[in-house]
Amino acid sequence: MSFRRYVATARRSIARHGGGAAGLWLVLRRALRVVRAMGLSGLVGRLRSASTVHTPVAEPFDAPTLMDPVPLGAFNLRVGVMAHVYYPDLIEEFAAALSLLPVPFDLLVSVVDADAEALARLSFGALPNLSRLVVKRVENRGRDIAPLLVAFHDEILSLDLVGHIHTKKSLYTGSEQIDWRRYLLDSLFGSSERLAWILGMFQADEELGMVYPESHVGMPLWGHTLLSNAEVCEALANRMGIVMDRQRYIDFPAGSMFWARVPALRPLYDLRLRLEDFPVEYGQIDGTLQHAVERLLGTVTRHQGYRLGILPADGRLALPVEGQRNAASALDANVFERLQMASLEAELVTVDVFDTLVTRAFLTPAAAREHLAWRLHQRFGIERFATQRDDAEAALRARLGRDPALAEIHDLLAQHIAHPDLDATSLADLERAHEQALLQPRTGVLAALQRVGAHPLCVFSDMYLSRDDMQAVLPAAVVRDIGHWRISCETGRRKDSIATWKQVAHEAGRADGRWLHIGDNEHSDVQLPQQAGLIAPAHILRPSALFDIVPGLRVLRHPQGARAPWPEQLWRGLLANRFAGVADTTPRRLQGPPTLDAATLGYVVLGPLVLDFLLATINAARENGVTTLLFLSREGYLLQQAFGRLQPSHATAQAISGRYFLASRRATLLPSLFDEHDLSRLVQGTFNGDFDAFLRARLGDMAAKAVRAHAPERMDQSVFLPEMSDEVAHWLAPAMPDLLALAAQQREAYKVYHHATVGDSTAMMVDIGYAGSIQCNLARILGAAQGGYYMALRYGALALPDSGWAHARYADGRTTHGEPGSSILAYDLLLESLLAAPHGQFEGFVCEDNAPLQPRFGPVELSTEGIEVLANVHAGALEFIDHACAALGEDISGLKFDPLGVQIPLHCIGSGRWDAHTPLGLLGTEDAFTGRGTVSAGKTG
């Protein structure tokens, strides 16, 4: 097996085992077999020096390397180092670092004058392990990147690995960046043992494409975006066949020092860049070809099918595959605390609008437009609306030399669409109404602005919506706080031009720089105002950015990124907005594993799952002619409420009745007994406890009393099922006449209850599922086949066909020839505790002559505080349903989620990736049927 095939298999194995220690251990054991088969038995040995021990990454969200380094005796890669020496006074510092290389290497040095060339040859020529020294005098153009890609193009392509370093001073920052340079050099060349470990990792793992240090503390979080380099990056990426997303946070070696596998960088060399392609040097700080290439290094490596290995800032020898990007500093203080400090010297405060004062329901603006296009196609048959609208806006921007307004865009768009029922005005009205439905106030930011006294607000936005449009679509709570508007489609000035900032500062009398801007866009709201000499802007984290910034939330990113289908971007967008609220008010909850309170737990874990399940349930009801849904207690308690929230927006659901139906394994098992041959049904499954507990759990108190009258001596005896199933059946036999009498009584009661609930309609049971026991029991009780729709069914549900039809949304053991893999089944008791009703387990009916049926419930397992927590969990889930319905309206009926995707949040809670121990510690579920009693939700993962 090749390493590439092995790594692919390894990743699948980790995924199957939940990404935890079990999966990693299985992969490591398989790794031993792989490397022995390849004849590299040394792969599994560690370098003997204690400093080379591979310390696992402590954070659960950072994937450590799966391999140990190859000892240098087995090392066979051709190594080179390319060093750009612009400051010759640092040659000795670099020579000391290069002297630590423990393997033969080529050294490729670029200098800018003859004196530096002579010094380089003298100092570097004496290095140990030096195989070849090549020194080239280059023009001061393209800094360290041009020599890497142009001057030493052919030499580097002849290598397997290349290290890249340069005499970084960054004097344009105002002072020499000594700490930054030494941090990078120490991380990459700190000792011979460290170098041996890094090089050994490249030999051991063919998937490792680049190793570089975590960003230096001097690199701000917002600097991990494209900034002023976006256009140049996109142009280069297009030439290499790479699709860029301008909104994403990226991993790249900030400071451009790294070790790389040469094939990982091959697309950059295939560009055949020339020295003339790089700008003449005059101290640029961003926006040049060299800056763009630096930001593309990690992207190109991943595009080539390799992974990054990012050395932790604390010096540990570990290689997480994604960087921390100094995100912790952005989560140290809430928005109010940051605005309070930032505004101390401000005489003018301006604020961005979208993603700052308001959030959209969708993760990206493009997804919102794709939904609008979907709606217009459904209603009017319009094709390619999103593309046509983008083209119209771009054409007008080029023609007008400014951002066009919405009315102007639709004047042109209506001509292209030429729909008989839609003119420019109606098209624009449809877009305004769509925008309005998607927007929610960002309450944490608005409250912070009020507290610091930044009212009335002066908004500064690059937007096609005019002031009148904004006042029509923005929430009232936002509009009433705005006193002044600067919108690009009206002023002709965009924030993404530094000239705009300087012009407005002059016009507003703030040439002194005492102007604070607040916004989310790293380039136009943060970088440019800072470069224009303003007070350091207040960076508000864009909701979608949290999925890049917060390691524990990265699992929520869709594999297709910004190109993911709009339904996937809807539920993820709503979750991002919820987490943005946390970042605005209590950001430290997002440091380490994200910490969830009860309402957030319900919103992000149950919300998407319940909505998806209900949408699938409604479709199943329609396909099977069902008009009544029976949401089985107790998990049906929340499901029935959520169905009620969904109904007004869902045309099909409006024709279906949803009822909360009292049922449990205990309450339906007794009335499903008809004769002594049914004894075997009582002793199925597992149970650990005494005989009395067994009877109460499976048949109820009255049945236990009846059996006690026949066999009092048995009541304290232990019961272990399935081992004692025959013996327990023998104990029950003497009491069967009394049990069957009770069964008949409860059976008649259930028939009356079912008819009162269902009448003559066609009903379908809806439940979390597993084995379909209640459906089987009710089919026997009612003497008719039943239909059921479940979240998941285990292999034991094979008996269901005898009781009617059944379908499962997320996992069906009847079709997998064994237990299916699913987060629903892996965290079944956890999910049950979250969905549960605030009342005890239903135990049957109180049957008295000439009296209405009265349900009988067991004791409530939760404390008063636990019931309050459960209510908050349910409120959060219902709020998610409300937000989705508000955003989509009647389009909710066409919503289709990926069933695997909506289980991710449940897995995050169950696996411990997210922390909900506080609310979960107060929740639990009863599992008396197996003898476990009440199981705490905090112990069910």
Image (cartoon, helix red, strand yellow):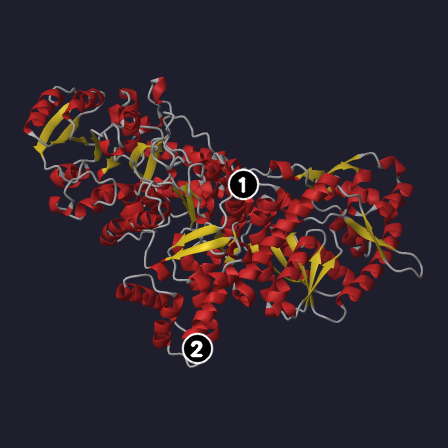
Q: Position of residue 794 (x, y in %)?
A: 61, 50
Between 66 and 429, the one nearer to me in the picture: 429
Say how many tags the image has: 2
- Whether 839 is drawn above or below 191: the answer is below
Q: Position of residue 570 (x, y in %)?
A: 49, 56
Residue 910 is at least partly visible in this image: yes
Identified at 37% across, 50% down, the residue is: 247
Quarter assignment of residue 930: top right
The amino acid marked with disc number 1 is Thr
Disc 2 designates what residue?
Answer: 422
Query: How many C-alpha atoms fall within 10 Å of the one at disc 1: few (<14), some, or many (≥20)?
Result: many
Q: Position of residue 11 (x, y in %)?
A: 41, 42
Q: How far is disc 2 from disc 1 in space, using C-alphas? A: 44 Å
SS label for mark 2: loop
The quarter of the picture where the C terminus appears is top right
Identified at 62% across, 49% down, the residue is: 876
From this viewpoint, which residue is outermost toward the bottom?
420
Between 210 and 692, the one nearer to me in the picture: 210
Disc 1 designates what residue?
Answer: 585
Left/right of residue 542 with respect to residue 195 in the rendered view: right
Q: Position of residue 217 (x, y in %)?
A: 36, 31
Left/right of residue 853 with respect to residue 134 in the rendered view: right
The amino acid marked with disc number 2 is Leu
Quarter assignment of residue 263: top left
The quarter of the picture where the N terminus appears is top left
Residue 724 is at least partly visible in this image: no
Say whether disc 2 or disc 1 marks the residue closer to the N-terminus: 2
- Whether 333 is drawn above or below 839: the answer is above
Mark seen at residue 524: none
